[in-house]
Image (cartoon, rainbow, N blue to C red):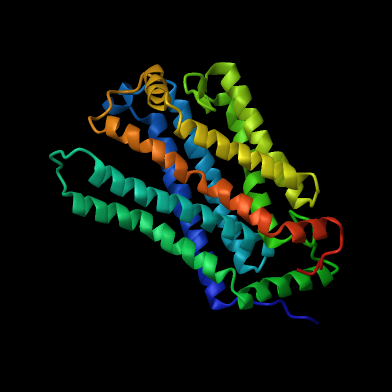
Amino acid sequence: MTSTPRASSSIIAAGIFAILGGVLSSLFNLAALILFSFSKFPLGATYPDFMRPVLYMIWTFFLFCAVFLVVVGIQVIRLRNWARIALLIVAGCLLFFGVIGIAVIFVTIFGAAPTDPLVSKAALASVLAVTYGIPVIIALWWLILLTRTSVVAQFQSSATLDAQSPVISTFRLSKPGCPLAVRIVGWYLASFVLCLPFLPFFPKRIPVFFFGYLFRGPPGLIFLFLYFALLIIPGFGLLLLKRWSYPLTIASQLLVCANGLAATFSPTYTEMVRSALAAMSLPELPPTAEQMLNYSRYFNLLSLTIPIAILVTLLVVRRQFFAAASGTADTTS
C-alpha cells in the first residue's frame, strides 16, 4: 500500500502563513462590513451616498479572496498542485501591489508640498514601509519556495499518487500538459470572472476611462463588461489549451497597454480626472491632492507591468504552449 506523501516543514509553514493571512484578512473585512453597516459616524455623512455600495462591493470581494486564501493554504499543506499555482499567483499580486504601494507612499510623503504633520515624515514612512514591506517579503518567500525543484517534486509526486488512486479524483482547472507559466497567466485572467457579479451594482457616477474618453452610466457598464470578457475568455482558453486563445490573449494585453498609454499621455488627462472627481461629489480634497494628480499619471505606467509581463511570458513559452495544444508535449509536467 502506497503511503500518502507528507509536506515538508517549509511547505507547512507557507501554508500556515497563507491560512493566518486569510483568516486575519477575513476578520478585518467582515468587521469593516459590520461596522460600516451600523456606523453613524459624522465623517461618513460627508461622503456621497453612492460610495456606500462601492465600499460594500470592495470589502465583499476581498472577503471572498481571503476565504479562498484560507482554502489554498490548507490545500498547499495537502500538496495539491493547483493550490501551489494559486499561491504563486497570490504571491505575484502581493509583490506587485506591495511594491507599488511602497512607491506611492514615498512619492506622496516626500514629493508632496511640505505641511505641518503631527508625525514626522521619516516615522510615517517607516511605519507604512513595514506595513507594505511584510507582504512583499512573504510574497518573495512564497515565490522562491514554491518554485524550487525539490518542492515542486513533492507536489508532482502527490499528484501522481492521486492520479493512480482509484478513490481520489484529481481536481484540475487546466488540461494536462499545460505549461506552468501558461497556467499562471490563465488563472490570473480567468479570475476576473469574480468581478462580473459586482458589475450590476457599479455606481453610475463613477466614470470609466477608455482611450482618453470618459463613459458613465450604461455605456460605461457595457465597456466594463466587454473589457472583462476580453480578459476572461482567453484566460479560460489558455487553461484549456485552445490555440485561438494565444493570439486573443496577446491582442487583449496589447489593448490594455494601449489604453493605459493613451490615458497616461493624453493632453486632457488632468482635466478628465478633475471632471471625474467633481462628478462624484466627493468631500473637499486636501491641498496635496493637486500635486498627487500629476503623479498619478506616472503611476498608470506602473500598472502596465502586469500586461507587459504576460506578453513576455507568452512569447517565451509560445512553442511549449502550441506543442501542448497539439498534444505533442509531455503530459507528465
What residue is drawn where x is 16% and y is 40%?
Answer: 114
In the drawing, does residue 32 fall left or right of residue 66?
left
What residue is drawn where x is 15% and y is 38%?
Answer: 115
The x and y percentages for residue 255 are 62, 36
Q: Is residue 171 in view from this perspective?
A: no
Q: Residue extending furthest left?
A: 116
The x and y percentages for residue 135 are 42, 58
As rendered, which of 324 and 157 lies closer to the eye?
324
In the drawing, does residue 201 fall left or right of residue 102?
right
In the drawing, does residue 325 fall left or right of residue 310?
right
Q: Quadrant of residue 45?
A: top left
Q: Residue extending furthest bottom?
A: 1
Q: Quadrant of the N terminus?
A: bottom right
- Above or below: residue 145 compared with residue 274: below
What residue is drawn where x is 50% and y is 25%?
Answer: 212
As rendered, which of 149 and 313 lies closer to the eye?
313
The x and y percentages for residue 85 are 63, 60
What residue is drawn where x is 54% and y is 71%?
Answer: 145
- Above or below: residue 266 compared with residue 235: above
- Above or below: residue 96 compared with residue 224: below
The x and y percentages for residue 302 are 45, 45
